[in-house]
Amino acid sequence: MGLRELKKKQTRKAISNMATQLFIERGYNNVTTAEIAERAQVSVPTLFNYFPTKESLVFDEDKEMEQDLLNAVLNRQRGQSITDALLEMGLASIESISREQRKQYATFMKLIESTPELSLYSKQMWMRHEKALAQLIKKESKKKMAPIEAEAVAHFVLDSFYRAMGEKNPTTALKSLFKILKEGMKI
């Protein structure tokens, strides 16, 4: 990554962090994009060059998250199952989150769940990720899968990531959920 791209990435992250903090402190609808642009010392059109919508300010890692999911499947070790590769990616992601970030997660999720615009955006983002992951699972699976089967697996994987992050011990929770996926649910 060149210096210019790095600078843009850092600026984008700084704007998103600042906007998210303002939304948490004052409420999503009480903060304007003009105010965010002013605090970030950029024009409103420049702000929208970085983020196409106000909602996207909160989800600055949207594209990276989707690419990480796809890369986990595409770049898995020879002989490694898709499920194991996704679990490994999820565990690595959990490990990379600091204790402080984990504490902030509940506050972040409260913002999303209590703001209809952010909740809708979040669901649409997850559906995009789910669709992309399902298509790749279907393509890469050794077993012939119907689209609905691949979609169900992708949905379970993403839901497992979400649920695990809300638990006291996300690593144990994620392993437990993936065990259900790998071994099946025997009720």
Image (spheres, rainbow, N blue to C red):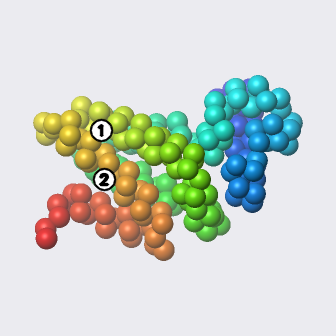
- Marked residue nearer the N-terminal end (1 or 2): 1
Left or right: 182 with respect to 136? left
At a point 30% along the width and 34% down the height, the residue shown is 136
Could you give the CA–CA distance between mark 1 and mark 2, rounded to whole angstroms? Answer: 11 Å
Q: Is residue 80 left or right of residue 12?
A: left
**In this image, 107 relative to 34: left or right?**
left
Local packing at callout 2 (Cα closer than 10 Å; few below 14, some 14-19, many 20+) is some
Note whether 50 is above or below 55 in the view shown. Answer: above
Tag 1: amino acid: Ala
Q: Which amino acid does label 2 sit on?
A: Phe
The relative height of residue 183 versus residue 15 in the rendered view (above or below) is below
Quarter of the view holding residue 171: bottom left
Q: Position of residue 74 (x, y in %)?
A: 35, 35
Q: SS of the residue at dot 1?
A: helix
Q: Is residue 46 above or below residue 26?
A: above
Task: Give the quarter of the figure containing the C terminus.
Answer: bottom left
How many residues crowd around disc 1 within 10 Å: few (fewer than 14), some, or many (20 or more)?
many
On the image, the x and y values in percent for residue 33 come to 76, 38
Q: Residue at x 42, y 64 (%)?
A: 164
Q: Name the residue under label 1.
A: 134
Q: Position of residue 94 (x, y in %)?
A: 49, 59
Left or right of residue 35: residue 140:
left
Q: What element carries label 2?
A: helix
Label of residue 156 in the image? 2
Q: CB atoms at circles 1 and 2 under 8 Å apart?
A: no
